[in-house]
Image (cartoon, grey):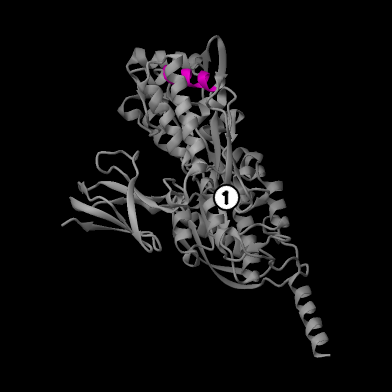
Amino acid sequence: MKKILALVMALAMMLMLVACGPAGNQESQPPQGGGEQTNAPQGGGEETQPPQGGADLSGTYDVTIWCPEAAVELTKTQVANFNSSNTMGITINATVEPVSEADAATNMITDVSAGGDLYFFAQDQLSRLIQAGAVMKLGQGAADYVKNNCVASSLVAAKSGDDFYAYPLTADNGYFMYYDKSVIPEEHVDSFEDIIADCEAANKQFSYELENAWYNAGVFFATGCHSDWKTDDDGNFKGIDDDFNSDKGLIAAKAIYKLVSSPIYVNSSNADFASGSAVVVTGVWNYATIKSQLGDNFGVADLPSFTVDGQSYHLYSYAGCKLLGVKPQSDAVKGAVLNQLAQYLTGKDCSLQRALDPVEGKTPDGNPENGGLGWGPANTEARNDPAGTNPALAALEEQNKYSISQPNIHGSWWDIAKVITTDIKASDGSDEALKAALEKYEESIKAVFDVTDEIRNAFTVIGKVNGSDWDVDFEMTNDGDIWTSKDAFEMEAGTELKCRQGKSWDVAYPAENYVVETAGTYYVQLNAATGEITLVPAE
C-alpha cells in the first residue's frame, strides 16, 4: 500500500509539472516543451522539461544577462518592459553585465556555474557551448517558436544536428560594400574590374580582407563551390564536404588574384576612408563611422560581380547571426521563465528597438540609451518592418540574395582557409600556381580529422610571438592543468597572444588577447582550469 501511495503521489507531481497555464501576450508565450539539459559534459545528460502551460510561473527571479556593452542600457529597459507587460506574474530582478558576444562562449565554458543565465553570443561558438553543457537544448515548443518567428537564414545557426539550442537574436553578421561616390561612379558599382580600375586611377585603396577565411570563402561560393562541416547532436564535428580545390575553385582563385595583385589592394575590413580607401568591404558595425567619414560622398551597395573567361559571377558572402543562449538550470521553473524572457527579447518589439538607425538617432522615446543600435533583426516581423532598417541594412538585405548561411565551422578551418589568399598573393597568377594553392588547402582540411588525441588536447601559444604574426603555434608542456611554453619568448610591451587547444579556435584563452605589460623574456603559462595566463620570467 505504501508503494502504491508513493506512486500515486509521484504521478500527481508529474501532472502538476506538465499542466497547461495561462496564455500571455504574443512575445511572452510559454515555451510549450522548451526543454533544458542538465549541466553534463560534452552536451550530454538527460533532458529536463520545464513546466508548461498552466504551471504557476509567478514570482521574482534573479537573472544574470550578458550582452555587449552597447546594448546594456537598452536590455535593462526591455527587461523592465517585460516585467510590466507579462501576464504570468513574473518579475525579473536582472543583473545586466557587459560581455561581448565574441567573449561570452569562452567565459561560459571556463565556469558554467558563474556564467550568465541568458547571454548573447556569436553563432560560430555554438558547438563548443553544447560540448561544455553550457547552453540549453530547446524543447519542441521552443524550437517551433524559433522556426515560426525567425528568418530562414538564421535557423541553421541555431542548430546542431536536428536540434535547436539557441534563439536567433540578429541576422546581420554579413558584409557588403561601402564606397566613396567621388571615386566610384554609380554605373561601376556592379563591376569588380571597374572598381579596381577606378581605385588605381585615383590611387585609392580597395580594402577587402581576403586574407581572412570569412571573406575569401564568398569568392568560392560565387562560383558554386561549397564547404560544409558535419556535426552530430552533441556538437561534435564528424567530417567536411568541400570542393574549393576544383575547376570552380580555380575560377575563384583567378578572381582573388585580380585584386590582391593590384597595388591598391589592402587586406582590411576597417572603416578607413579617412586614410585613403575608396572601397571597404565590411558590415553594419561600421555604418555610423563610415557615414561620418564620407558625408555627402557616402555610398553603400551589395558586392559587385567579377568576370573570368567571359563568365560573370556575383560575389557571395557569409550570412551570420548573433544568438541568445539560455544556461541549463537545475530549477525547471526558472528554466521556463528564462525561455519566456528569451522569446520576449527576440520578439518583434525588442528587435525593432535594437534595429533603429543609430545615425539618425531614431529611438522609441528619444533617449539614445533605449534604442538605435542598428542591429538587423532575426525576427521575421521586425525584419519586414520599415522601421527596422537603414541604408546599411538595406544593402545587407540585397547582398543576402547572394549569401550562404554560416553553419557551425571547425575552429581550425579559419587558419587553414585564410592561407589560400596568402598563397595566391605570393604566386605569379598562373593556373599551375593557383592550383597548387588549392591543393595545399585541400591537404590541410583533410588532415583535420587525422589529428592525434595528443595534439587535439594540447595547448599552444599563438600571437605576435617570436617573429610570428598569429600564424605559428608554439608548443607547451603540462603538469595537470598547468601548461607552460617549451621556449621562453623575448617580448616587447604590448605584445598580444593567446593559448589555444588543438591548434584550433574552438577553445582559446583569454577571451580578449593577453597583452604583455612589461618587456622581457618570459615563459607563457596557462591554467587550463581557469583560463588564466601568467608570464614566468626566464632566468
Check disc 1 and give the amino acid type.
Answer: Asn
Q: What residue is rendered at 46% in x and 64% in y? A: 111
In what quadrant of the picture does the C terminus appear?
bottom left
**One can see residue 335 in this view:** yes
Judge from the rendering whether residue 512 lies leftward or rightward of residue 352; answer left or right: left
Q: Is residue 48 above or below residue 364?
A: below
Q: Position of residue 156 (x, y in %)?
A: 63, 43
Image coordinates of residue 263 in percent, x first then y, are 33, 18
Residue closest to the far top: 310
Residue 207 visible here: no
Q: Main secondary structure of the magenta part?
A: helix
In which quadrant is the N terminus drawn? Answer: bottom right
Residue extending furthest bottom? 1
Residue at 47% x, 30% y is 441
Membership of 418 in magenta stretch: no
Q: Secondary structure at mark 1?
A: loop
Look at mark 1 in the image and give the residue it sits on.
236
In percent of width and height, residue 166 lies at: 60, 53
Q: Is residue 422 left or right of residue 517?
A: right
Q: Position of residue 397 (x, y in %)?
A: 58, 32
Residue 478 picture quarter = bottom left
The one nearer the camera, 184 or 418, is: 418
For the point 42% across and 18% down, the residue is 433
Q: Which residues are magenta?
A: 249-258
Q: Residues within 10 Å of mark 1 (few under 14, many from 20)?
A: some
Q: Tell me the quarter of the picture where residue 45 sits.
A: bottom right
Q: How many marks?
A: 1
